[in-house]
Image (spheres, rainbow, N blue to C red):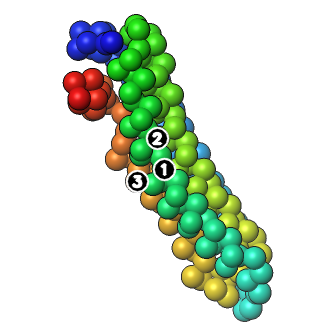
Amino acid sequence: MIGRAELEAMLTVESVRGLQILQLSLGVGVVLFCGAIVFFWWSGEPVESAPPGVVPMLTLAQFAVAVASFAVSAPLFRSRLGAVRNAGSPEEGLEALRGAWMLRVAIPEGAALFGAAVAFLAVMNRVVDAHPLYWINLATPAVFVLFVARTFPTRDGLMELLRDRLTG
């Protein structure tokens, strides 16, 4: 079991920087994809009418996936943090933390990319020109980017999070 001193030794500047790079790269990837979507919409020719096709069904599906992914990622993250407590060494604890953190960010990222993909389909088929409501598919990527910003890892934040887990 890892104590406070081992926890502080485990959370070096380099280990925290690795988590920061991971989280930042996932967030930036979603932002760049959304930027490309807006660029394709902006550079295309608007149309008066376009049949929505599968976009309505995919919109509903992506929102269901988004709700499920955000609902599932938090309890999975908390349960995986238990592995940090049971780690035999700081190195094992750090690996457990990295794994938990990847789950925390990667699951909602999948939902964000699904929302962006549906928006991309709607833009490329010019559905958003006739039915602007389908821009709503970019809400999931926007929520993900806010999530990335809100949960951005810092050493102090990780210490507080893990201190609660290690003592509870």
Image coords of residue 92 (percent x, y): 46, 13
User: Which label belongs to residue 57?
Assistant: none
User: Which label belongs to residue 76?
Assistant: 2
Q: Is residue 95 above or below residue 133?
A: above
Residue 125 figure quarter: bottom right
Q: Amino acid at mark 1?
A: Val
Image coords of residue 141 (percent x, y): 53, 58
How far separated are the C-alphas under marks 1 and 3? 18 Å
Q: Amino acid at mark 2?
A: Leu
Q: Amino acid at mark 3?
A: Leu
Q: Of the residues under marks 1 and 3, which one precedes in the sequence?
A: 1
Depth order, front residue of 57/16: 57
**In the image, farthest residue toward the bottom:** 48
Element type where label 2 sits in the image: helix
Residue 131 figure quarter: bottom right
User: Which label belongs to residue 72?
Assistant: 1
